[in-house]
Amino acid sequence: MTTPPLPAESKPELSKTLIVVFALLLCCGLPILPLYLWRKKRLSAGVGIGLAVAWVALGGIALALAPDDKKAGDSADKPAATTSATPTKTATDVAAVSETPTPTPTPTPTPTPTPTPTKKAAPEPTKAQENALRAAQQYIDMMGMSKKGLIQQLSSSAGSGFSRADSTWAADHVDADWKAEAVEAAEQYMDMMPMSRSGLIEQLTSSAGSGFTRAEAEYAAKKVGL
């Protein structure tokens, strides 16, 4: 079993005790000796008193040089005081930091959908338009006719005599495939007389003839084999 080391403060305390004892001897004990010798007439009065004063002065110097425990203790306590003065975070400070409010994000506004414009309902046809449409359908069923030729037949005074507006409305709404009508008209021309490709196309596109477009006439000529 090891013996624990002595406290570090034991040596300074021992040296201080010895110095104090020595100082007391100088101040109290040794000055008596010169006075005693003076009383016995072995020393003169001046020498005896001088030695006594010198020993008292030496004792005072020894006491002044003795280490001061209070100052040493104060100097030893200063680092500890400095260390203890360091501020530390308390539970209240940590709670205050943790309770810092988080900024609420600004909500993004939802774009308002643009309303889709609704189509206006077509107006009801007039009685004249209905009659023109029935007449147009009868012409289409009897023979191959172009859209231009149908409008001319409906609005002609020698034909049905409808207004130009009603005739156009009827041609726009009649159930007809104008390319198929061109093929039907080409077959009718070919049944009446033999015709070349260019002659057939000329007859189909002529304003005095059927009044089909160039594309419709070429399509019909190809379909009849020309």
Image (cartoon, rainbow, N blue to C red):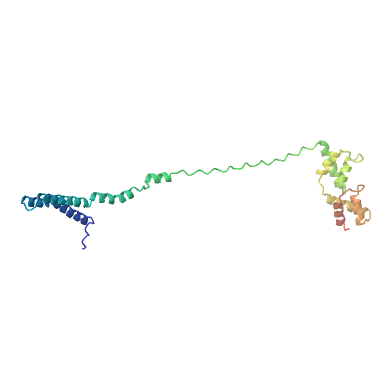
Residue at the bottom extreme, as displayed: 1
Residue 146: image x %, image y %?
Answer: 86, 47
Image quadrant occupied by the N terminus? bottom left
Could you tell me which residue is drawn at 83 percent across and 37 percent down? 128
Considering only vertical position in the picture, is 141 above or below 7?
Answer: above
Q: Tell me the quarter of the picture where residue 7 sits.
A: bottom left
Could you tell me which residue is drawn at 10 percent across and 52 percent down? 34
Residue 170: image x %, image y %?
Answer: 83, 42
All told, the count of numbered labels is 0
Image quadrant occupied by the C terminus? bottom right
Please name whichever residue, 13 or 187, is drawn nearer the observer in this view of the structure: 13
Residue 10 horizontal side relative to residue 188, left or right: left
Residue 219: image x %, image y %?
Answer: 85, 54
* Residue 133 in view here: no
Could you tell me which residue is drawn at 83 percent across and 49 percent down? 178
* Residue 92 in view here: yes
Please name whichever residue, 135 or 71, is drawn nearer the observer in this view of the structure: 71
Please name whichever residue, 152 or 15, is drawn nearer the observer in this view of the structure: 15
Considering only vertical position in the picture, is 128 above or below 187?
Answer: above
Q: Tell me the quarter of the picture where residue 221 sits.
A: bottom right
Please name whichever residue, 178 or 42, is drawn nearer the observer in this view of the structure: 42
Residue 84: image x %, image y %?
Answer: 32, 49
Residue at the left extreme, as displayed: 40
Residue 209 horizontal side relative to residue 124, left or right: right
Residue at the right extreme, as displayed: 193
Residue 66 horizontal side relative to residue 163, left or right: left
